[in-house]
Image (cartoon, helix red, strand yellow):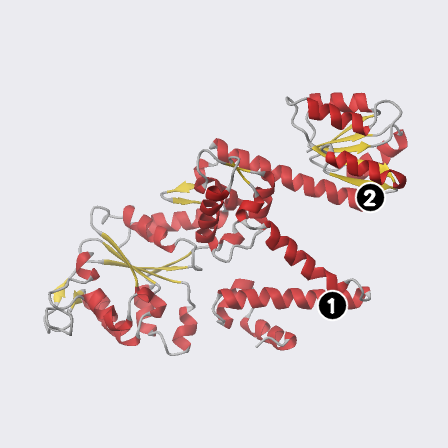
Amino acid sequence: MKILIVDDEKAARYGMAKALRTSGRVILEAEDGEQGLAAIRDESPHLVFLDLNMPVRDGMFVLQELQKDSSVVTPEIIVVTANDGVNHAVDCIRAGATDFITKPYDLEHIRSIARRSEDRVSLQNRLEEVQSGTAESGRFGEMLGTCRPMQHLFRQISKAATTHLPVLVRGESGTGKELVARELHRSSERADGPFIAVNTAAIAETLVESELFGHVRGAFTGADRDREGVFRQADGGTLFLDEIGDMPAGVQTRLLRVLQESVVQPVGTEQTIKIDVRIISATHQDLQQSIEDKVFRQDLYFRLKGIELFIPALRTRQEDILLLANSFVDGSLTLSRDAVAALVQHNWPGNVRELRQMIHAASALCDDGVIHASDLGLVEERSSELGEGFEKYFDLPLTEARQLLVEDFERTVIGRALKTENNNVSAAARLLGIHRQSLQQKMKQLGIR
């Protein structure tokens, strides 16, 4: 991180440099506009604090010269001005400056500016690394991930694929549970056999048994011919049962028999048919809680979870957001700096599925070959949250405002966790990393039902 300070006063440069100097930063100085312009061209700083009023070539001169020179990548420029120069500073922003601060300035304020700039530089470097292909090592089959939890998951998949045990995949909606199932199949001895995926929650309850186990002609009204069912279709291969937690109780009993005896009995007949199928199931629900609530069979749960795999939520793997986003971007498009920042700041309740759909929609809407935060629909969302989040605290005493802010923050975070987990308190507690009793106590304190 290179920071350039352009000021004709030596003491001002010294004080700012001392406040900004820290490990990982290079502090450059220039005492007039000519030197500052040369330093920008030669050193390519990431951030410039530019004094507006200097006797030899002022700050406006530097900005105007940079506008003329298209060969120079213009850095982030913060104009520094006396209080009576604010109007002139606004003209500087029109000429290409990023922002301005007035003298005397608060040292913590300029440190904050530098930290934000450092974050943006880090994000931009990460994006360039991803786009240049140096992060390709994060690919595992059709999945991408360089963070430690994903690398751990990839190793688990590789090991689980070599066994014949059933696998239960856990994770929030949109995290890619079917991709995990496909990779387990692709890496297994059954790779040459069929891979059949079925979402049990999407099948009408009256048709679940027929869809899974098949039926014979005349078994029920409308059954005008025999149907194999997905178990027989997957014979010799892998059957992926998604949203297993939504399976009706009667079907759970029949599925348990299939797992125990490796036979299926089509609806409308007493005949049983031998099958050879590996079962991979998935759910976003807390099956332990479903067992406590008597809506899911415990013996079926233990049969399904021969091996249990967990997919981390996208919000917990920030280092992968840009990697994934870039993989979804059309090759003719690029992500702008503000889009990169918005993507990393977003909470991603819909996980990878939400990211993919957002990028595809933005690709269709952008006009200049560059995807901006406004194309992603994240700018207004974040700015409105910020405005609504702080205005009500401004007129309160500091201690009272702090307490109210913490309570509002906890109420929002807990509410979001409960919404994500369909109001399942146990699952929300796990998501928040606290004990269920602690969450229940906090909910009571905050009046959350």
Q: Which residue is mark 2?
A: 107
| Residue type, numbered disc 1 | Gln
* Picture quadrant where residue 284 is located: bottom left
Work out whether 1 lies above or below 229: above
Work out whether 222 lies above or below 43: below
Position of residue 390 in the picture relative to residue 239 (left or right): right
On the question of residue 195 being in view, the answer is yes
Can you give x and y, in whole percent of width and height, for residue 301 in the image?
34, 69
- The label shown at residue 266 is none
On the question of residue 146 being in view, the answer is no
Tell me the SS state at disc 2: helix
Instruction: Looking at the image, tell me whether mark 1 or mark 2 is earlier in sequence order.
Output: 2
Work out whether 332 lies above or below 204: above
Position of residue 324 in the picture relative to residue 236 (left or right): right
Residue nearer the viewer, 133 or 332: 332
Q: Which residue is mark 1?
A: 403
User: Cα distance, mark 1 to mark 2?
Assistant: 27 Å
The quadrant in which the C terminus is found is bottom right
Position of residue 295 in the picture relative to residue 216 (left or right): right
Can you give x and y, in whole percent of width and height, for residue 197 in the image?
28, 56
Residue name at image x 50 percent, y 46 percent? 147
Residue name at image x 53 percent, y 47 percent? 376
Work out whether 329 lies above or below 398: above
Position of residue 233 in the picture relative to residue 441 (left or right): left
Residue nearer the viewer, 144 or 362: 362
Q: Are marks 1 and 2 in contact (CB under 8 Å)?
A: no
The quadrant in which the N terminus is found is top right
| Residue type, numbered disc 2 | Leu
